[in-house]
Amino acid sequence: VQLQASGGGLVQPGDSLRLSCAASDFTLDSYAIGWFRQAPGKEREGISCIGSSDGKTYYADSVKGRFTVSRDNAKNTVYLQMNSLKPEDMAVYYCVADKRLRPGRESTPTGYEYWGQGTLVTVSS
C-alpha cells in the first residue's frame, strides 16, 4: 500500500491550496483516509478524515470551517482543500489510510495502518 500526498507549496496568508492523496496499488474508496500535519518542533496533529463507506468527515478545531476533505473515486484520489491559510498552518502534511478505522480515532496516528510521504506547505508573506 503506497500513498502519496502532493500539492504543497509556498503561499501567502489568506491564500488557498489543494492537497491530493493518491494511491497506485489499491483503491482508496474502501479506506478511511486521514490527513495529519507536523510543524517543526510540534507534535503530529490529525486534522481531517473522511470515512470509507459513509463518507463521514472529521475536522480538528484548528481547521474547521477552512479546510474541506473530499473524494473523487473515479480518480482514486482524496483531496484536502485548504482556504484562508494562516502561518500556523505551515507544516508537512501527510495522508494516511486504514480499512477499519475505529470511531473516535480519526485524529489518532495509531488509528491508521498506512502512511504516505508528506508534502510541505509553507505559509509566509
Image (cartoon, rainbow, N blue to C red):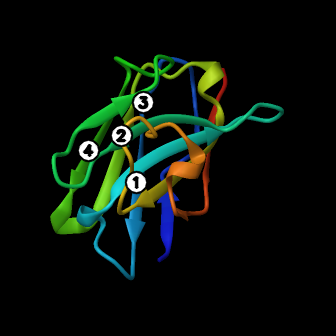
How far apart marks 3 and 1 lie (CA) works out to 13 Å
Q: Position of residue 87 (x, y in %)?
A: 64, 20
Q: Element at badge 1?
A: strand
How far apart marks 2 and 3 lie (CA) works out to 30 Å
Q: Residue furthest bottom?
A: 25
Q: Amino acid at mark 3?
A: Ser
Frontmost of labels 3 and 1 is 1
- Of mark 2 and mark 4, the one earlier in the sequence is 4
Q: Amino acid at mark 2?
A: Pro
Q: Is residue 124 left or right of residue 77?
A: right
Q: Position of residue 27 (x, y in %)?
A: 28, 73
Q: Which residue is mark 2?
A: 103
- Of mark 4 and mark 1, the one earlier in the sequence is 1
Frontmost of labels 4 and 1 is 4
Residue pictured at 66% horizontal, 37% vertical: 91
Q: Element at badge 4?
A: strand
- Of mark 4 and mark 3, the one earlier in the sequence is 3
Q: Amino acid at mark 1?
A: Ser
Specify few, some or many for label 2: CA neighbours under 10 Å numbering under 14, 14-19, or 20 or more.
few
Specify few, some or many for label 1: CA neighbours under 10 Å numbering under 14, 14-19, or 20 or more.
many
Q: Position of residue 65 (x, y in %)?
A: 34, 17
Q: Residue furthest right?
A: 41
Q: Are marks 3 and 1 in contact (CB under 8 Å)?
A: no
Q: Which residue is mark 3?
A: 16
How far apart marks 4 and 1 lie (CA) works out to 10 Å
Position of residue 30 relative to residue 56, above or below, is below
Q: Are marks 4 and 1 in contact (CB under 8 Å)?
A: no
Q: Which mark is residue 20?
A: 1
Q: Which residue is mark 4?
A: 70
- Of mark 2 and mark 1, the one earlier in the sequence is 1
